[in-house]
Image (cartoon, grey):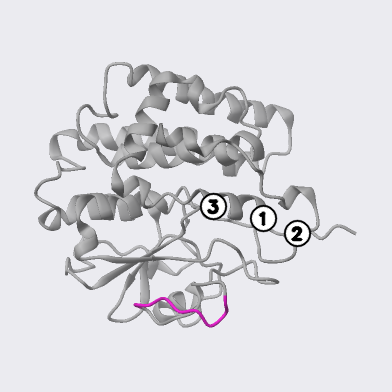
Amino acid sequence: MRKTINNGDACALPTQKGDQAPFSKKFSTGELPVEPNRYHYVWAKFCPWATPAAIMIDYTGLNQVISKFATDPLRHPGIDDDWFFGKHADDEDPVLHTTRLSQNYKKAVPNFSARPTVPALIDSTTGGVVNDSSRDIMFELGGSWQAYFDKKVPDVYPDDLKSEIDAMNTRIITDITSVPGKISDVDSQAEYEMLFNQYFDRLERLDERLADKRFLMGDHITLSDFWLVVSLIRFDVVFYFKSKLNKKRLDDFPNLWRYAKECYQIPAFKQNTDFTAIKQHFFQVSDEPVTSIDRVIPGGPDLSTWAD
């Protein structure tokens, strides 16, 4: 009998976990103090929701005042509802000194019993999760931490572009980032085709937009670029196959392909892109022995094209 591995919510834009509101605290409301070297960002290298902020932290220079650490990309055998900080059960996050993410949720809410999700912003003074919404974390860091940005880097969330960036982020998240997860839950051909068309229609429009722009908002990287590039990197590697998003490949969109490769060459993007972790998680899923073709990690595509 083939053993089913539950991929569960690999990573997602988290919804509020019942009445456990401590996971939605913000800097912009004054609930959280903007204090260097106090916060720790837990992410996953495979995750299209957690990776944008990891890139932004490095790109803006916030990595000098906010630490980060990635969970292991594979579920541990028999445990599909938690994220561990290493291959072995006793591997620790070097800052938090916990072995699994649920422990940090419980430091904020002792009776926490829901599924921990990445990303998670953690107050290192308590070890507790303070925000686990990928979108909130991006907006909050981009909007409240400019004083700690590297002065040589243009503002990634400038006041005069905030409304346009917010609208673009919504389009990217709705039509691209969230579509593979939604496709995995479809129960009809019509629903799949609706999402399929939504995804490729948005890619076509973005390809047209980039015909005369270096980045989505012009000459400088903004929050929108972090969102889009992360999903584009995972398109050919995972979603073309796993989510049946196979109308075209990324290099069939000349402007998107040029743009994605240019961004990938920027150190903050490249050093936070782990193709092995991406493929391990989405295909192999867990550390359990591989016994079926659905968990075999594909040999392709040719990743050397990203360095051309």
* Residue highlighted by disc 2: 290
Q: Amino acid at mark 3?
A: Thr
Marks 1 and 3, the one that precedes in the sequence: 3
Q: Residue drawn at (37%, 25%), measured in percent from left and top? A: 258
Question: Is the Cβ of the residue at disc 1 closer than 8 Å to that at disc 2?
Answer: yes
Specify the segment rendered in magenta. Answer: 88-95
Quarter of the figure with the C terminus:
top left
Q: Is residue 283 left or right of residue 149?
A: right
Residue 238 appears in the rendering: yes
The reply to whether dot 1 and dot 3 touch (C-beta < 8 Å) is no
Q: Is 118 situated above or below 161?
A: below
Tell me the distance, in whole angstroms, between the alpha carbons under discs 1 and 3: 11 Å
Per the image, the residue denoted by label 1 is 284
Residue 94 is situated, as x and y percent measured from the top left of the image, at 37, 77
Residue linked to disc 3: 276
N-terminal-most mark, 1 or 2: 1
* 15 part of magenta stretch: no
Kindly identify the amino acid type of the residue bearing the numbered disc 2.
Answer: Val
